[in-house]
Image (spheres, rainbow, N blue to C red):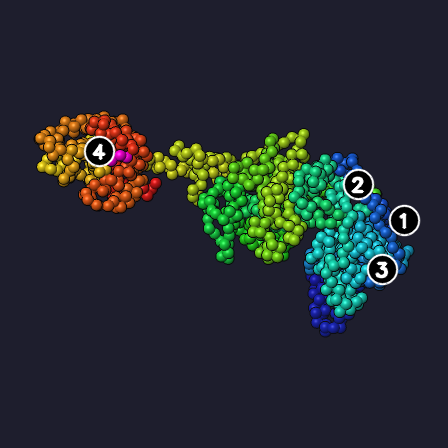
Amino acid sequence: MSDNYRSREERRRAMNDNKPEGKSQGKPKKKKKGGLFRKIVAAVLLIGIIGLIAGVGTFFAMISDAPKVDDSVLKNSFSSKVYANDGKTVVKEIGAQKRTYVQYDEIPQVVKNAFIATEDVRFYKHHGVDFYRIGGALMANFKNGFGAEGGSTITQQVVKNSFLSPKKTVKRKVQEMWLAYQLERKYSKQQILEMYLNKIYFASGEVYGIERAAEKFYGVKSVKDLTLDEAAMLAGLPKAPTTYNPVTNPENATKRRNTVLNLMAKNGFITQAEADKAKQVDVQAHLAKQTESTSKYDVFIDQVIEEVKKKTDADPFSAGLEIYTTLDTNAQDYVDDVMNNKVVNFPNDKFQAGLVVVDNETGGIQAIGGGRNRVSGGLNFATNMRRQPGSTIKPILDYGPAIENLKWSTGQPIKDEEYHYSNGTPIRNFGRNYKGWVSAREALGRSLNIPALKAFQATGADKAKEFATGLGLKLDEEDGEAYSESYSIGGFRTGVTPLQMAGAYSAFANEGMYNAPHTVTKVKFPDGTEIDLTPKPKRAMQDYTAFMMTDMMKSVVNESYGTARAVRTPGLEIAGKTGTSNFSAAEKQRYNIPDAGEKDVWFNGFTPNYTISVWTGYETAKDGYILSPNETGMAKNIFKHVITHISEGKPKGSFKQPDSVVERSVEKPTGKDLKRPSGSTPSSLITKEYFVRGTAPTKVSQTFVKKEKEEKKEDKKEDKEKKDNKDVKPKITASYSGGAISVNWSASNAASDTTFTVTMSSPNGSEQLASGAGAGGKTISNPAPGATYSFTVTTNTGQSASSSVKVPDSSDQATEDDSTKPEDDGTTDDNQNEDNSSTDQNNGSDQGDDSSTQPDDNQNSNNGSNSSGSNSGNTDNNNNNNDSGNANDGNNGNNNNNGGATTPPADNGGSDSGSQTPQTPATPSTPSTPATPQQEPTTEN
C-alpha cells in the first residue's frame, strides 16, 4: 500500500512537472500576487486608521486642558513680580503701565508691511498655522542647525505670549497650533495683527507696543509719522531687542534693518530702489535723545527681563510671572552709590564705569553697575559694552591653558627678551625694557607682554580657545575672526564685557567649576508651572589650574612688583589682574590724544566668595582719555570699596590648596630649568612655588656650590698673598760723595713681580725718581749745598721705607762719611716694619686714593718750565702742590709716612701746607707717569 501510494504521488508530481507553463500554473500565481498586495494595502490602511485614531485621540488629549481664548487676556496684560535673592522681597512689579494701545486703522501700511514681511509673509493666506512655512523651517534647521529659522506665525506668537507657558514641548506646540486656529476663527486678520503690534516687546525700560516704541526711539507723537527706514528698524527689533538696539548697538541694528528692507523688497511691499534709498539713512540719524532716567534696580531688572525672554519666550510684562532673582539689594544699593559719585570721586561727568558682582559658588549676579548718568534704555557698560580686555585676558588665554595642558608651575622660567610675533611683527613690554629670566608668577605680576605671548605660543591657539570657551568666552565666534597671537595680550577686534569677565574669573575662585553668570533662578507662571533657570555648573579646568592661577594672581596684589597693590584690604585674601588698552594711531591723531593716554582700564579681582569685574573709560574717543593717576587707579579704587562693603559681616574664607598641588622651594630662575636650592644658595634667591603633583624638580642646583668653592679658593689665594706681602721688607739708602748723592733701594723677601716706586723731596719740591720691578739705584748730581734730600721707596704691596741725606755747605769740612747717616737706614727699616704691622689693611685703599690724582700730577709735570735750574727742580715744584693734595685725601698714607720718617720733626714742619722747604712726603706717592701700572685703578674708579 505504501509503495502504491508512493508511486501515485510520484506519478502526480511527474504529471504536474510535464504540464506546459502558463496554463495550469499561471492562474494560481496571479491569484497569489493579488492576495499579497491586498494584504499589504489592508495592513497599511489598518495601521493608518489606528494611527489616525491614536493621533486624534492624542491630539484631543493634548488640547483637552488648553486654555480658552479669553478676550481680556488678549487685550490686557498682567504684571509680573520680581523677587530679590531672599525669595520674599518684591523689588519691583513690572507690567503694562508703559503701553499705549493703538487701533489697526491708526497704524500706517508701511509699518504693517514691514512686520508681515519679517515675521509672517503668508499671514493673509493661512488659517493660523502655516504648514508651508513649518516645512521650510524644518529644512532650514536641518541644514543650519536647530533654531536657524522659526515656523510660528503672527497668530501663534499672539497665542504663545497670551496663554501658554514657554516650555518647549510637543504638547505646548500642539496647544499653540490649536489655539491659533481658534483665534483665527474668532478674530479677523486685522484684529490679530492689531493685538500683535500692541503686545510685542521692543526695548528695556518697559517699552511695549508699536506706539510706545515709535515715541521711545524716534520721539514721534504718533506711529503714523514713522518713515520707511524707521519702520524697518522697529520691525527688526523684536527678534533680539538688546542685540539690535540702534541706540547701543548701531552696527548690528544697521544690518538688521537692511535685512528687513530686503525682505520687504523681495516680497513686493516696496521696490528695490526704495529699499536701497532707505539703507543709505544712518540708523542713528533720527533717534530721539534718551532722557528718561532709570529708577531703582532698573539696571539689574533689565538683565532679568532679557534672561526671562531668552530662556522662556515668556513676556514678563504681560504674562503675570513670579520671577525669582539673585539680586542682593545691599550690594546693589552700594554699587548704585558708587555710580552716583557718593563713594569715589570721578574725574568728570563723561568718565564712565561698568561693573558686575558675582557669587563664586553659584554664578549668581549680586549687583550690576551699568554706568553713570544712565537713561532708560541707554548703553549698559556692564552687560552690553564690549571693550578690549588688555592684560586681564592673560590668565585666560596664556597662563591658564599652559598650566592646564602643559602642567607649568607657578615658577615656570620664561625669558623676557627682545621678541616678535610669528609674522615678524615686534612685541614690546609696556616699559620698553626686558627682565631676562623670570617666573611665570613674576611675569604675570609685572604684566609683561613677551612672556605672555610665549606662554600662548607654547600651548597653541586651539588649546587657548578651548580654555576660554569653557569659561564662557566664545571670542572668535563673536569677533568673526580666528584666534591670532595678538589675542595673548588682549588685542581683540571687538572685546568683552565685565559680565563675561566676572563669570570667567569666578571659575578660578570656584576650584575650576564654571557657573554661567545669571540673574534669574526660577520663574512661576499663573497656572502654577515652575521653570528652574539656574545654570548647571561645569568643569572648566582642573583644580590644580584654578588654584595655581589664583596664587599667581595673588602676587599681582601682594608682591612688591605687583600692578594691583592698591587693592590690598586687611582681612581679605584677594587675587586679580589689571589691564589697559590703547587708542589706535588714527584715534590719537584725530582727537589729539597723547601717547600716554589710555582707552580702557580694567581690574578683575576676586576673594573666595565674590568676583568683581570693573571697567573704566569713556564711551567714545571724542569724550576723553585716561591719563591722570585718579583715572588710571579708578578701577582698582572701585573694586576695593565694593569688595570691602559686600564682605562686611560675612565669613572671609580662603583659597584651599588641592591634593593635586605641592609647594616646593626652588632657586629663582636663571635659565630654562628650575632646580632645588643647595645649602650654598643665598636665601634672597630662594622662592617657594606650586607644582602639579609629580612634576616638582628633583635636581639640586650646583650654581652656588661651585661659586662657593671658587670663592673659598680665591679667599685662600688672597690670604696667602696678604701673608706674602707682609714679609716684603723694602730698604733704601742715600749717601753724598764727590758732589753727588747716590740712592739705592731693594727689598727682602721680594717676589719676582714686586715693583718699586722711588720719590725724592728736595728744596725744589717732590719728584718721582724711578718706578719698576726689581732693586735699583740712582745718582743725583749737583745737589744744593746745605740742603737735605729725603727719599722714599714704596712697593706695590703697600710697604715703604725712607732715608735722607744732608749736603754739606761749601765751607763745611765734614767728611762724606758723616753725611751718609748709615744708622738712619736701620732706624728707618725698624720703624717702617713696626708701622706697617699696624697699617697693612689701609695701604691698598690709600694707594687707590693716590692713584686717582695721577693725571693731574702728569699735567703739572708737563707744564713745568726750565728757566735757570735743572729739570728736576721745576718738576719738583709742580708736583709739590699735587702731593700736598694727595696727603689731604689719604690720612692713612700720611700716618704711614710719618711713622717711617727719619728726619727730625723740624724738617717735617709745614708738609701739609705744601711749603717749599725740605720735607718728608705726607703720603706714599704713586707713579705720575701714565705708562706705569698704577694708572689702572684710576680708570676703574
| Mark toward the start of the polypeptide (2 vs 3) | 2
In the foreground, 918 or 133: 918
Q: Secondary structure at mark 4?
A: loop
In the foreground, 287 or 24: 287
Q: What's the distance in space between the residues labelled 1 and 2, CA to CA?
A: 24 Å
Give the mark toward the camera: 3 or 1: 3
Q: Dot 3 corresponds to which residue?
A: 224
Q: Dot 2 corresponds to which residue?
A: 92
Q: Dot 1 corresponds to which residue?
A: 72
| Mark toward the start of the polypeptide (2 vs 4) | 2
Pinpoint residue 624: horizontal percent, then vertical percent. Answer: 64, 50
Q: Amino acid at mark 4?
A: Pro
In the foreground, 289 or 747: 747
| Mark toward the start of the polypeptide (3 vs 1) | 1
Q: Dot 4 corresponds to which residue?
A: 918
Magenta residues, as a range?
914-918
Q: Secondary structure at mark 2?
A: strand
Q: Amino acid at mark 3?
A: Lys
Pinpoint residue 655: horizontal percent, then vertical percent. Answer: 59, 34
Q: Residue at x 85, y 57 (%)?
A: 222
Q: What's the distance in space between the residues labelled 3 and 1, CA to CA?
A: 27 Å
